Image (cartoon, rainbow, N blue to C red):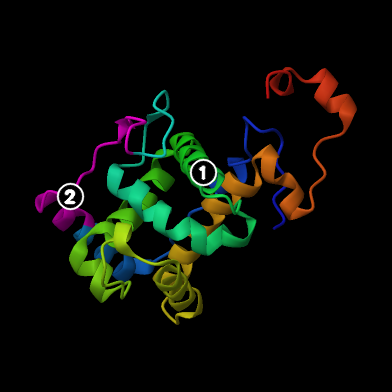
Amino acid sequence: MNDHPTSSNSLDFSNIDRRSFLKTGLGGALLLGTVSVTAGLSGCASQPAGRLSAVGTRMDASYQFRFLTEDDIALFEALLPAMVGPGLPERPQARNSAIAGTIERIDAGIHKFGPANQAELRRLFDLLNFGLTRVTVARVWSSWPNVTTAEADAFLERWRTSRIGLFNNGYIALTKISNVAFYGYRDFWHLSGYPGPPQHAVDALPQFQNA
């Protein structure tokens, strides 16, 4: 991983926001647009999850989701063990906490994106969450809460190696925002070989004081 974080509370999503994630062409744009409309008409959740109860979830009850829906959260809970699995703690409680924290940072990062990239990601997430396209396009038969890590890994590999640009760029989008949110957090800097900021920066910059 080549992204070097700036701090634990201010992850470097700035370069991502300057990119267009899904350079799909007309066909891909029409597909994503159709899926988003169909998902909305079929009742798929499109509102941010807001605050989730800590009871029965991994999430911090004080955190308020401002972009990710509950379906999106389930999607990333399934995909993160496949994307960053070797870096996750082995102990179940610590592992669950690391996944939850990463998802919260994904949400916080996307919330800072411009409207164009937010719209692209919403269409991508709708494509993966809508049952018909999850099966036909992603070839994932189970709903995301029931997907195994092996199945998630197979899905990611299919999209990574696909000849279809929409799928390639979808894979890049998913892995980019996940890797920045995971490896950009100071507890996991060492996994990417990043030693952290120099001590004089830590001492001088206020964002590090309460990190």
Where, quadrant-wise, is the N terminus in this rendering? bottom right
Measured as percent of width and height from the top left, residue 122 is found at 33, 49
Residues drawn in magenta:
36-56
The reply, left or right, for residue 156 in relation to residue 71 is right
- Give the residue number, with chain letter if any, for mark 1: 93
**Res. 100 visible in picture:** yes
Is residue 88 within the magenta segment? Answer: no
Q: Is residue 177 above or below residue 139?
A: above
Q: Earlier in the sequence, mark 2 or mark 1?
A: 2
Mark 1, Cα crowd under 10 Å, few <14 / some 14-19 / many 20+, is few
Which amino acid type is marked by label 2?
Cys
Q: From the image, state whether disc 2 or disc 1 is nearer to you.
A: 1
Is residue 53 within the magenta segment? Answer: yes
**Residue at x-position 62% and y-position 30%:** 9
- Give the residue number, with chain letter if any, for mark 2: 44
Q: Is residue 76 above or below residue 56?
A: below
Q: Nearer the viewer, residue 96 or 92?
A: 92
**Residue at x-position 65% and y-position 43%:** 184
Give me the disc on residue 57.
none
Measured as percent of width and height from the top left, residue 51 is found at 33, 28
Numbered disc 2: secondary structure: loop
Q: Which secondary structure is most common in the magenta stretch?
A: loop
Which amino acid type is marked by label 1?
Gln
Where, quadrant-wise, is the C terminus in this rendering? top right
**Residue at x-position 64% and y-position 56%:** 87
Measured as percent of width and height from the top left, residue 109 is found at 51, 38
Q: Total label count?
A: 2
**Res. 18 visible in picture:** no
**Residue at x-position 76% and y-position 48%:** 190
Single out the residue that lies furthest toward the bottom. Answer: 163
Q: CA distance from mark 2 to mark 1?
A: 30 Å
